[in-house]
Amino acid sequence: MTKLFSFKDENKTDINWSNCSGTVRSILEGYLAGKEISVQDGIQLFSSGPADEKFICDIANQIRKEKTGDVVSFVVNRNINFTNICYMGCKFCNFSKRIEDKGAEWLTIEQIVERAKEAHSRGATEICVQGGLHPKLSANFYRDILLSVKKEIPDLHIHAFSPFEIWYGASKSKLSYKDFLSDLKECGLDSMPGTAAEILDTDVRKQLTQNKLSTDSWVEIIKEAHFLGIPTSSTIMYGHIDGPEHWANHLVKLRNIQKDTNGFTELVPLSFVYKDSPLYLNSKGTVRKGPNKSEVNKMHAVSRLLLSGWIDNIQVSWTKLGLERASELLNYGVNDLGGTLMNESISRSAGSDFGQEITSFELVKLIRSIGKIPIQRTTLYQPLFDFSQKDPTETAPLVDRTSRKTIDFINQL
Ligand code: SF4
């Protein structure tokens, strides 16, 4: 049996299991002895009570220490959502608009390049480009974005296009996923967001997205990207009509893909934001108001354990959970705070009120306040700057960059 990691002997004897249930203890002891966490084990861990949760989170924190030390990383990036016009009708989505709707938006290539240049001048090393599936969008639009941005700013990393967009662009251009992705790579696609995963389960997807992008298609596109040398992130959107069985299955699916391809850079658990989500608003009480605190803790901690050795970067989404919860989760298995974003709009559309941007100066302040080492990284997790001793340059914020809640939290650190 391959040992996934080793605790130092003194730590091993530190574990006092007296409050832990027999089932969870046996799973965690098996894990500490090198056994992989199975789907069944995952279900048990996700279903466990408060006493067990403490063991799961503490052990996840130990593993986080072994894997990534006390470094907490982040990337300076900008989200560019080039259109919110989309007719796919995913039930959880409040971002999409119809062409005639107030607030419908479609950026031209020139506007996208302008935003990229502005981001670059503010220190961004990455733009994250995603958009709705606009019915009038030509398949060439995707490649034109890449060519136009790279022409102006060749060294800016382009992290772009969800598997849903790849599915759409490939079908519009009548190319296989492989050929469509190869072309995008040649045009400058550096990596992709592993969004649109939601929950990789056919029954759940049918209810969330009408299964337009099936689980199999999501997996096929992600694997094609990885095999072509296009890394992706991975995500899970949880806390709506799903539960422990779906979460454990989803994570094991991601782990199996990683065993084949080694193309995932991180996992980003995305808590369902219910407030303005049609899925919740139209459900008459059958859809949950997102995951509860314990489920959020366990999602990050179990992900750390279940993916250990395969996906060792666990990112918390500050736009969904806020900075206070994000900083707590840095002790429950999380090692990355994601990006500065500059223009977050998807979580905001669903009712999240943690703002659109956080500056690197503020992230560094937060990381230092909990005694960890702030590192600005590249999209692919290469360290760029160590801010443990010096401050990053303060950048002038964009208008309406963040929320009062976020500013107040930063100010009291
Ligand atoms: S989640 Fe994406 S694909 Fe689905 S409706 Fe919203 S914008 Fe369209």
Image: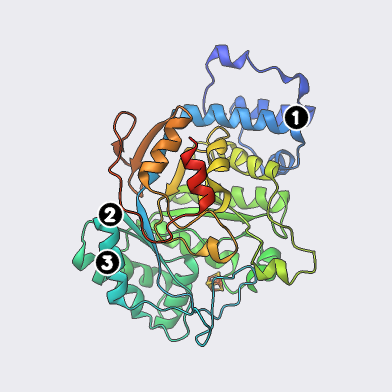
The residue at which mark 1 appears reads as: 51
The residue at which mark 2 appears reads as: 122
Colouring mode (rainbow / by chain / secondary structure / one colour): rainbow
Asked whether residue 109 appears in the rendered view, the answer is: yes
At 21% from the left and 62% from the top, the residue drawn is: 153
Secondary structure found at label 3: helix
Q: CA distance from mark 3 to mark 2?
A: 27 Å
Secondary structure found at label 1: helix
Please state which amino acid type lies under the numbered disc 2: Arg
The mark tally for this picture is 3
Q: Mark 2 Cα within 10 Å, few/some/many (few <14, many 20+)?
A: some
Q: Is residue 287 left or right of residue 325?
A: right
Asked whether residue 313 appears in the rendered view, the answer is: no
The mark closer to the camera, 3 or 2, is: 2
- Quadrant that contains the N terminus: top right
First in sequence: mark 3 or mark 2? 2
Residue 59 versus residue 145 in the image, above or below: above
Residue 186 tag number: 3
At 46% from the left and 65% from the top, the residue drawn is: 162
First in sequence: mark 1 or mark 3? 1
Q: Judge by depth and name the residue closer to the eye, 266 or 132.
A: 132
Q: CA distance from mark 1 to mark 3?
A: 52 Å
Name the quadrant where ligand 1 sits: bottom right
Residue 209 versus residue 23 in the image, above or below: below
Q: CA distance from mark 1 to mark 2?
A: 46 Å
First in sequence: mark 1 or mark 2? 1
The x, y position of residue 341, in whole percent, is: 41, 56
Residue 10 tag number: none
Please state which amino acid type lies under the numbered disc 1: Ala
Quarter location, residue 298: top right
